[in-house]
């Protein structure tokens, strides 16, 4: 038996030769619906999709495949025509079933005369129940059924159909058959348009059937434009098969291509009433729209009803997932409609684009308003919208699209002051400082006449540029002097506050930075500027970190991350910065399970040097296993600090760097470079507690306890300011270490108690851990003697690992004295001169030290001595 044997009086089952592609997933789904089940009532498969979706081809291919199976069902196929609405209520069903020529089916229907009108569909269903074989009835183009009696009779017949009958309905849209009760009972399997759309893999097979092989990029381009629409893919295959330059055709393939346009006009648009066609053309101005916008574009107050009708009839229109109330036309259709729009005339297009621009502006879709104003070609309207909406669009993360609008705007629009400032803001947002500087011009340009708001914006942009290139203090002063106060524009105000707060942070004015940034976050929230909110909270986290206010730093960083997780998307770099600050907090507190920090080149190479520095420092400090060698790691941290002398990096950040860099250098035997660190700190911070701490640490390493105490004294008595509170904790721990080396147990405990008092409120643990075995020993000896800090002291004590017992032979007094000189990296001759002994004596003692420590080199001796607590 072949497919063509199942013919009706007016049409054969369509055959397309051999199907271009057998769509297995849909074949299997149809077969599941048609599977015989004597205990289950009749079921229905409803294929509903726009014209050209491949419904008929799919069914014909499936029927052909079904005919080749071992248990061949009886197939009844009818291609519905308009005249079927006039032939009697149940005529389509009877015609399809009688055309099977199956003797059992014909016998069951013999009681019904061919020209008799059947009033009760249940009697036909009852007659068919006597047929003991599977029957599959396919009604194609079922959307053409409109006669109420015919629809009611077909719906009733489907509800009463015997278990042996399975029905497949296919059409551009589902006619009103009242199948809702069957759906509730699970007797209807819907195949919506999106399920019938070709996947990219199926599209590949389709093109292969046309002897075409597209690379992944070209295939995705075609699929995106067609959205898997079967006829769109076939038309693309036809066009590409004829082309001598397929790449050029791909670039030009769209709804306005002649082959595609002819199909769209003949099969889609010509079926519309004139008023509906005008509605579709005019509402295609935006790439998506609501009923309200469609009403404004078309002047048709019945837009909602028209859209409901088009959607119900499976016109190539769809609701946008995740955006309730929004519609869009399928890409190929919209491209054709855009060509139709252009034929309306320049004035009509301008009017429609301006309507869309004003509607989007009122709706808060700033960048879409700008794009439609640019398409309108109305220079005055575009200048006005750029001045009013341009900055907000940039601050909401649409800088690239704003630049695209400006690039396509007339020179007279681009040359305007507002347009230049908006471009500068967009260039800064994407890290193009050179372009922003070029647009802003020289400093003198800032004194040009303009409104107070444009002047405030220009000063703010110059300050933001200075944050990356230098001159922060003068730029901030100019902003305060020439553009003081608030503008009343929440977007500009929040942008200015954020920029000023970042500048205060870079200058080390933490109180001022916090005030400005908190105001920026509040203003950005009221202005619905999610990206600025994320930036403000991430920067507030950095301010809190500089203060060593770890709880606040963690809270602000968490807020930035939560805003992003909730869909309030900010720049990736700011979210990652917040994550790094949270990791730094965990590192300093030595939380039990600190988050792993992966190296992130995008963040470490951020155009803002402060952000890049924080990223590189925290990544290197928290995870020091990435370095090829310890020496390279310590050198990288020192180089990072050195970069702070060339770029504006907040002094609080530099001060936080210092102990970690110093620790890395000393742990890795690079004592000579610690002096370089001291010079750098002095250059960046001036004479502060951070510089004194480095000098005192080096003196202690060399055994010069008096010099170390002298350097620490002004830090401990408060006459020398520490930029970072963390420095004071390190200083008191160093004082405790010095006292312990002198066997001064009272002052050792006192220094330790001061460090605990400073660290306990924020549970800062890392400095004690870095103090190593000597600090652990002090805590062991004085357990229970720290009063209110006892609980925290125990926490710190347990965080420091117990040092393994020293099984090396004891060093002599001379060897211990010489050992303290090794980190200085002076030569044997210089050490001999200082100790008033011969060079040979020094070399003899060195050999003894190496032997007892089990090392071979001077650097290994330094590292091992520190490991054993000898240095």
Image (cartoon, rainbow, N blue to C red):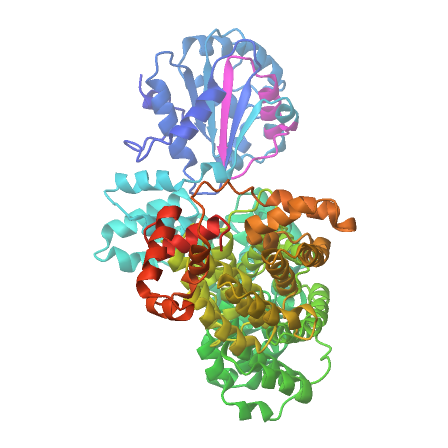
Q: Residue 677 at x, y = what percent?
A: 48, 70
Examine the rendered structure and indicate whether residue 91 appears above or below residue 581: above
Give 667 or 868, whichever is nearer the viewer. Answer: 868
Among the 4 quarters of the image, the one containing residue 211: top left
Q: Is residue 147 above or below residue 121?
A: below
Number of marks in picture: 0
Q: Which one is in front, 394 or 250?
A: 394
In the displayed structure, 264 sits above or below 370; it is above
- Would residue 122 be found to the left or right of residue 435 on screen? right
Q: Residue at x 30, y 35 (%)?
A: 20
Locate residue 54: give its quadrant: top left
Where residue 302 appears, as percent x and y from the top left, is 67, 55
The x and y percentages for residue 316 are 50, 48
Residue 357 falls in image quadrant: bottom right
Could you tell me which residue is drawn at 39 percent across and 32 percent down?
A: 58
Locate the N terminus by quadrant: top left
Q: Position of residue 103 (x, y in %)?
A: 41, 9
Q: Is residue 326 visible?
A: no
Say left or right for 608 vs 4.
right
Please provide the residue range marked out in magenta. Answer: 151-180
In front of the other: 125 or 48: 48
At a point 59% along the width and 20% down the height, the residue shown is 157
* Residue lying furthest right: 788
**Residue 791 painted magenta:** no
Q: Is residue 679 above or below residue 474?
A: above
Frontmost residue, 338 versus 668? 668
Residue 553 shows in the view: yes
């Amino acid at each position: 038996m072949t497919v063509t044997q199942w013919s009706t009086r007016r049409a054969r089952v369509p055959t397309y030769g051999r199907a271009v592609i057998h769509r297995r997933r849909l074949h299997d789904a149809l077969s599941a619906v048609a599977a015989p089940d004597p205990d289950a009532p009749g079921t229905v498969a409803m294929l509903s999709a726009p014209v050209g979706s491949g419904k008929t081809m799919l069914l014909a291919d499936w029927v052909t495949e079904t005919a080749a199976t071992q248990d061949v069902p009886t197939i009844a196929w009818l291609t519905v025509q308009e005249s079927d609405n006039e032939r009697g209520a149940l005529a389509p069903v009877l015609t399809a079933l009688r055309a099977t020529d199956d003797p059992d089916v014909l016998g069951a229907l013999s009681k019904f005369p061919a020209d008799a009108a059947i009033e009760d569909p249940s009697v036909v269903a009852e007659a068919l129940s006597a047929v003991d074989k599977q029957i599959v009835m396919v009604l194609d183009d079922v959307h053409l059924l409109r006669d109420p009696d015919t629809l009611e009779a077909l719906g009733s017949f489907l509800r009463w159909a015997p278990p042996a009958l399975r029905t497949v309905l296919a059409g551009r849209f589902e006619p009103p058959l009242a199948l809702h009760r069957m759906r509730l009972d699970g007797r209807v399997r819907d195949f919506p348009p999106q399920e019938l759309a070709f996947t990219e893999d199926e599209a590949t097979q389709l093109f292969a059937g046309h002897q075409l092989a597209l690379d992944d990029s070209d295939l995705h381009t075609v699929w995106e434009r067609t959205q898997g629409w079967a006829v769109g893919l076939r038309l693309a295959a036809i066009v590409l098969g004829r082309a001598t330059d397929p790449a050029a055709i791909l670039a030009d393939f769209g709804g306005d291509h002649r082959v595609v346009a002819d199909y769209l006009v003949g099969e889609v648009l010509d079926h519309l009433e004139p008023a509906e066609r005008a509605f579709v053309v005019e509402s295609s101005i935006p790439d998506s729209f609501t009923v309200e916008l469609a009403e404004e574009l078309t002047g048709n107050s019945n837009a909602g009803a028209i859209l409901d009708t088009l959607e119900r009839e499976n016109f190539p229109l769809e609701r946008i997932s995740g955006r309730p109330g929004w519609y869009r036309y399928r890409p190929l259709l919209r491209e054709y409609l855009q060509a139709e729009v252009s034929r309306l005339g320049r004035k009509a297009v301008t009017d429609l684009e301006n309507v869309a621009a004003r509607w989007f502006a009122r709706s808060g879709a700033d960048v879409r308003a700008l794009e439609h104003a640019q398409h309108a070609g109305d220079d005055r309207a575009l200048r006005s919208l750029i001045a009013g909406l341009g900055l907000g669009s940039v601050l909401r993360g649409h800088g690239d699209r704003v630049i695209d609008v400006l690039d396509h705007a007339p020179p007279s629009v681009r040359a305007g002051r507002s347009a230049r400032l908006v471009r500068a803001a967009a260039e800064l947002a994407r890290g193009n400082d050179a372009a922003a500087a070029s647009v802003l011009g020289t400093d003198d340009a800032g004194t040009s006449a303009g409104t107070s708001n444009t002047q405030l914006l220009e000063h703010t942009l110059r300050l933001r540029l200075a944050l990356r290139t230098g001159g922060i203090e003068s730029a901030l002063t100019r902003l305060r002097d020439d553009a003081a106060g608030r503008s009343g524009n929440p977007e500009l105000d929040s942008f200015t506050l954020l920029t000023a707060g970042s500048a205060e942070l870079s200058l080390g004015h933490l109180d001022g930075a916090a005030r400005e940034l908190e105001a920026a976050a509040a203003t950005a929230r009221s202005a619905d500027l999610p990206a600025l909110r994320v930036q403000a909270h991430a920067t507030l986290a950095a301010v809190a970190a500089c203060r060593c206010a770890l709880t606040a730093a963690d809270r602000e960083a968490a807020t930035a991350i939560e805003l992003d997780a909730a869909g309030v998307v900010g720049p990736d770099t700011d979210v990652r910065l917040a994550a790094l600050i949270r990791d730094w907090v965990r590192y300093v507190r030595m939380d039990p399970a600190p988050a792993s920090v992966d190296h992130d080149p995008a963040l470490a190479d951020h155009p803002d040097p402060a952000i890049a520095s924080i990223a590189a420092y925290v990544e290197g400090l928290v995870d020091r296993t990435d370095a090829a060698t310890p020496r390279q790691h310590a050198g990288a941290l020192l180089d990072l600090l050195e970069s702070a002398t060339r770029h504006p990096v907040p002094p609080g950040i530099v001060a936080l760097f210092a102990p970690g860099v110093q620790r890395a250098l000393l742990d890795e035997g690079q004592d000579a470079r610690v002096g370089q660190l001291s010079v750098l700190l002095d250059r960046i911070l001036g004479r502060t507690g951070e510089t004194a701490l480095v000098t005192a640490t080096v003196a202690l390493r060399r055994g010069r306890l008096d010099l170390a105490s002298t350097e620490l004294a002004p830090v401990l008595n408060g006459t020398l300011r520490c930029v970072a509170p963390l420095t004071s904790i390190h200083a008191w721990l160093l004082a405790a270490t010095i006292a312990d080396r002198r066997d001064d147990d009272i002052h050792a405990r006192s220094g330790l108690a001061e460090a605990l008092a400073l660290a306990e409120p924020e549970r800062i643990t890392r400095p004690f851990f870095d103090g190593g075995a000597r600090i652990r020993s002090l805590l062991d000896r004085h357990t229970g003697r720290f009063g209110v800090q006892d609980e925290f002291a125990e926490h710190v004590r347990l965080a420091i690992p117990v040092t393994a017992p020293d099984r090396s032979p004891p060093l002599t007094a001379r060897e211990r004295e010489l050992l303290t000189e090794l980190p200085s990296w002076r030569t044997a001759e210089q050490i001999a001169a200082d100790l008033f002994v011969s060079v040979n004596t020094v070399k003899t003692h060195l050999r003894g030290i190496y032997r007892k420590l089990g090392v071979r080199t001077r650097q290994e001796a330094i590292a091992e001595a520190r490991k054993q607590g000898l240095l």
